[in-house]
Image (cartoon, rainbow, N blue to C red):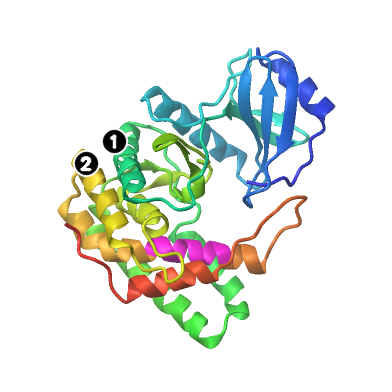
Amino acid sequence: MAVFTPVSFDELARWIKRFDLGRVLAFEGIASGIENSNFFVDTERGRFVLTLFERLPAADLPFYLGLMHHLAAHRIPCPDPVADRDGQMLGRLNGKPAALVTRLRGGALPAPGPTHCAELGALLARMHLAASDYEITLPNPRGLAWWQDVAPRVLPFLDRAQATLLRDELAIQQSFAASATDRALPRSAVHADLFRDNVLFDADRIGGVIDFYFAATDRWIFDLAVTCNDWCIDDTTGEFEPDRLDSLLHAYQRARPLTDAEREAWPVMLRAAAFRFWMSRLYDFHLPRPAEMVTPKDPAQFEAILLARRSGVPALA
C-alpha cells in the first residue's frame, strides 16, 4: 500500500457523506506497498481503510470487492467492503475509483513461529474452500501472460546470469502451463499475495487477512506455494525452515488434503510462486512510478528464493 493520489481532510469529509458512518474524526496515509493509495479512516461509526485504485482496471474491481464480501460472509476474517446508501461498494474520489472497507484488529508478524504458521495453514485451506463457489472469475493479472510481456522489458537491466535464469525459468513455466497436470489442479479465486504483512495477528490468533488486490482465479496449490515461500523460509538464504513449513502444510492438509496432481505440481508451483514475485519486483524496481509515498522492494530476495527452489524442495508429507 502507498499514497499516489493525495486526499485532503475536507475532500474525504465530503466524500464520506455518501455513507451512513457519521463524521470523519481522523485519517492518515499508509506508506507501505506500491500499488494503490491507502488511508486509515476513523469515523463516528468505526475504523476503516480507504483505497484509491491507481492502476487496477475498473472492470476488475467488482471481483476484488465481491471476493472480500463473499469470504466475510463465510466467516473468513477479512476486510468487508462498506456499501453506501445506494448499495454501491465502489465510488470515485479525486478522479480515482475508491472503496471503503472495514479495518481489522492486529498487526503484521515479522518473525512467525510454527504455531503461527499452523494457524495460517488452516485459515488458507478454509479460504480456498469458501471461495470454491465464488462465481466471478478473473485470470491472474500477474500470471504467465504478464511474465511473457514483462520479460523483454526487464532483461536489459539484468546481468548475464540473471538473464539466463529468467529465460530458463520462463520456458519451464510455459511448458508446465500446457501440461495435463496443470489442467487437473483445483482452482478458484485465491489471495495470491498472502505474505506476512498481509496477515494481522492479535496475540497468537489471526485477526484478519488483508490486501486482496492481487487476488485472481488461480490454482490453490500456487496460492499455497506463495504463502510457504514467505512464511516458512530463512530470510537470509531463502531456504525452507522445516518446522514452520511442516506446521503450515500439515494444518492446511488437515482441513483440505492435497490431490495427486497438486503433489506432482508442488515443486514447479514453488518455483512459479518465486518467479512471479521476482518478476514483479524487477519490474517495480527498474521501472518505478512517481509516488508521494512509496517503498520499492528489493528483487534480490526472490531471486535467492527462486534459486533455492530450483535446487530442490522438501517432499510433501
Query: Residue 23 sits in which quadrant?
Result: top right
Task: Identify residue type, mark 1.
Answer: Leu
Percent position of residue 63, x then y: 49, 35
Percent position of residue 72, x then y: 43, 26
- Disc 1 secondary structure class: helix
Task: Identify residue type, mark 2.
Answer: Arg
Nearer to me, 43 or 115: 115
Vertical arrangement, residue 235 with respect to residue 37, above or below: below
Nearer to me, 130 or 307: 307
Q: Residues within 10 Å of mark 1 (few under 14, many from 20)?
A: some
Q: Residues within 10 Å of mark 2 (few under 14, many from 20)?
A: some
Q: Residue at x 65, y 45 (%)?
A: 36
Q: Residue at x 40, y 78 (%)?
A: 168
Is residue 144 shown left or right of residue 41? left
- The residue singled out by tag 2 in the image is 256
Asked if the residues shown at circle 1 and circle 2 are in contact, with their CB atoms under 8 angstroms apart, the answer is yes
Nearer to me, 300 or 88: 300
Is residue 281 shown left or right of residue 266? right
Percent position of residue 195, x then y: 46, 50
- The residue singled out by tag 1 in the image is 129
Q: What range of the chain is rendered magenta?
A: 272-281
Does the rendering let one see residue 313?
Answer: yes
Query: Residue 7 sits in which quadrant?
Result: top right
Q: Which quarter shows the C terminus?
A: bottom left
Residue 156 sits inside the magenta stretch: no
Vertical arrangement, residue 239 with respect to residue 111, above or below: below
